[in-house]
Image: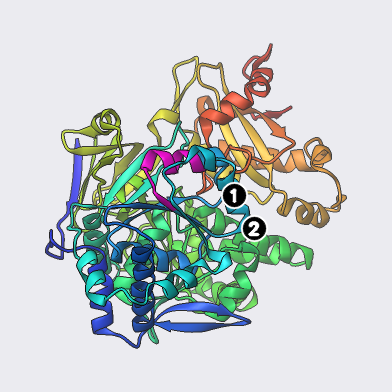
Amino acid sequence: MQEFSTPAVVAADPQANITDLLVQRVAATPELVLFSLPDGAGWKPVTTAEFHARVVALAKGLVVAGIQPGDKIGLMSKTRYEWTLIDFATWFAGAILVPVYETSSPSQVRWNLTDSGATSVILETADHFARFDEVRAELPAIANVWQIDLGDLDKLIAAGTEIPDAEIERRRNLAVGDDMATLIYTSGSTGKPRGCVLTHSNFLELSRNAAVSLKEVLTAPGGASTLLFITTAHVFARFITVLCVHAGVRVGHQPDTKQLLPSMASFQPTFLLAVPRVFEKVYNSSEQKAEAGGKGAIFRRAADIAVAHSKAVEAGKVPLGLALKFKLYDTLVLKKIRAALGGKVQYAVSGSAPLGQRLGHFYHSLGITILEGYGLTETTAPATVNLATKAKIGTVGPPLPGNAVRIADDGEIEVKGICVFKEYWNNPEATAATFNDGWLKTGDIGSFDSDGFLTITGRKKEIIVTAGGKNVAPAALEDPIRSNPLVGQVVVVGDQKPFISALITLDPEMLPVWLNNNNEDAAMTLDEAVVNPAVLAELQRAVDAANETVSRAESIRKFRVLALELTEASGHLTPKLSIKRNIILQDFAGEIENMYAGAPATEGISLQQ
């Protein structure tokens, strides 16, 4: 059993809680711009002192409304400044926030609020209210319902002016490190969501230690900054927000990904937080834009040179010829992508799925070091992460200070340390089942290199065992195929079957662009596209390229293209865009069986149907 650990670099304080991070930040830098709010084409600054004053004022409003210490408040809102304002105000009032994904269905809203025992809920929009209202009769414990877009936060603030500062100070100091800070429900990719009890110490100790490990990311000439666009309801963005408050990093928000590039141009972040799908889409849209302008070949040559250059840099020696080519293509192509991201991005923290070596090297040559990390809701997001001082593309880095990671005999990753959650809410059986002698069983399979850098190879429950007894990790095939601009999602199947197959969907945003660039009818429907010979040939190339990376027994022999999207709304993706494999296998069981009906394993390359 392999084990690597990194000692904590900041002494633990069991009596402290998350509110101390903001109080200490105010004392240190009251005039520092901590947030930037969208203001027309620009951004309006909010200083640390201003944010703190607003947090206290809103906490007073919650007190007047009857919120008691320990009460749970549901919050359903997209990523925006008010999300974090509510988060800290809830802590200052001594209460506990229960995030609800803004895309949740009425039944999911009901489950989160009833299982948690929430007594109040804050909704953002009329649409969110409508979904809540659909199940309101089944939520008798909910006494308060507030809506952000109706100005209810301002009304709460106005109502709380008579509450003395001393009452908020008393309440914010009630919680100690081991107390619950939030109740976050898992995305439910493998069944009914379970509430993860994350403590104040989970956030506070992890933030203090991560700030030391990631100091190069969290500091920059003129100040570090990040533009958040992934949902704050997910632990990944939530933790980063708390970390930024602690470290004094300026934060902006843009939940509309269609407005992301204009926002990055004006905000000019120094680091980004994203899932691999975002990096894939930036690359693919850049490639297709170049193709439309008759410069596709130049872009692909530039990308090849960029990847080769990054690998040479990593190896410690860049040949002169390669250096000269890179300088040329950097001027022609790469600097334009760098400018599109705001021009100041130096780092990007990536999680939730493997990025892939090619994209990692491509962005590295843009001057952007992508620090892949690994973690779960149960580990308060990062258990491991690559460091600015030493990053290995293709790995998720070593354990963060205060954490330990080991590989069990069956290859499963187990985690212990300051990041690990306390328990599943009201579910002692599930809690007991997920721990092994004090170590959290993650359900993921991985391996270490000699330096303790972790590589994720797949999910334990997702390992496919073919009829011939071959173990296949789906992600090894899915990730490279998904990087193709035409591909929306790909799901590898074949458990107890004679060979491996795949279900593929098309990316509706990239499809018309690709069709136009390849002299096909850009207006064709999805039903037409899934049988179009040019589209099928391109998908075949993507599948064949992935097959080259595995043995013949692991290769995809057939694939079926579905004339639909797999989305969160359809119930097939989690809020962080991971596939709900068990649901997909169930919903498309007929299509899967058809690929195997009377079909022997093919010789050679895959065959589309």
Task: Give the quadrant of the C terminus.
Answer: top right
User: Which colour assignment does the render follow?
Assistant: rainbow
Residue 272 horizontal/vertical position (percent) = 46, 67
Residue drawn at point x = 58 percent, y = 65 percent: 149
Residue toward you, 420 or 118: 118
Question: The N terminus is located in which quarter?
Answer: top left
User: Which residue lies under the disc numbered 2?
Assistant: 284
Q: Residues within 10 Å of mark 2 (few under 14, many from 20)?
A: some
Q: Give the label on residue 438, or none.
A: none
Identified at 50% across, 50% down, the residue is 101
What range of the chain is rendered magenta?
A: 109-120
- Circle 1 sits in a helix, a strand or a loop, which is it? loop
Instruction: Judge whether residue 462 can be spotted in this image.
Output: yes
Q: Whole-Å distance between the Cαs marked 1 and 2? A: 8 Å
Residue 188 within the magenta-colored segment of the rendering: no
Q: Which comes sooner in the sequence, label 1 or label 2? A: 2
10 Å neighbourhood of mark 1: few (<14), some, or many (≥20)? many
Q: Could you tell me which secondary element the residue under label 2 belongs to? A: helix
| Residue at the image point whose x is 33% and y is 73% from the top | 56
* Amino acid type indicated by mark 1: Ser
- Say what amino acid the circle numbered 2 marks: Asn
Determine whether 315 is above or below 491 in the image: below
Q: Nearer the viewer, residue 429 or 273?
A: 429
The residue indicated by pointer 1 is 483
- Does residue 548 appear in this view? no
In the rendered image, residue 224, in percent from the top left (x then y), is placed at 39, 78
Mark 1–mark 2 contact, CB under 8 Å?
yes
Figure check: 54 above or below 561? below
Image position of 47 with respect to 238: above or below = below
Main SS, magenta region, reads: helix
Residue that appears at 60% across and 68% down: 260
Front residue of this view, candidates 601 and 442: 442
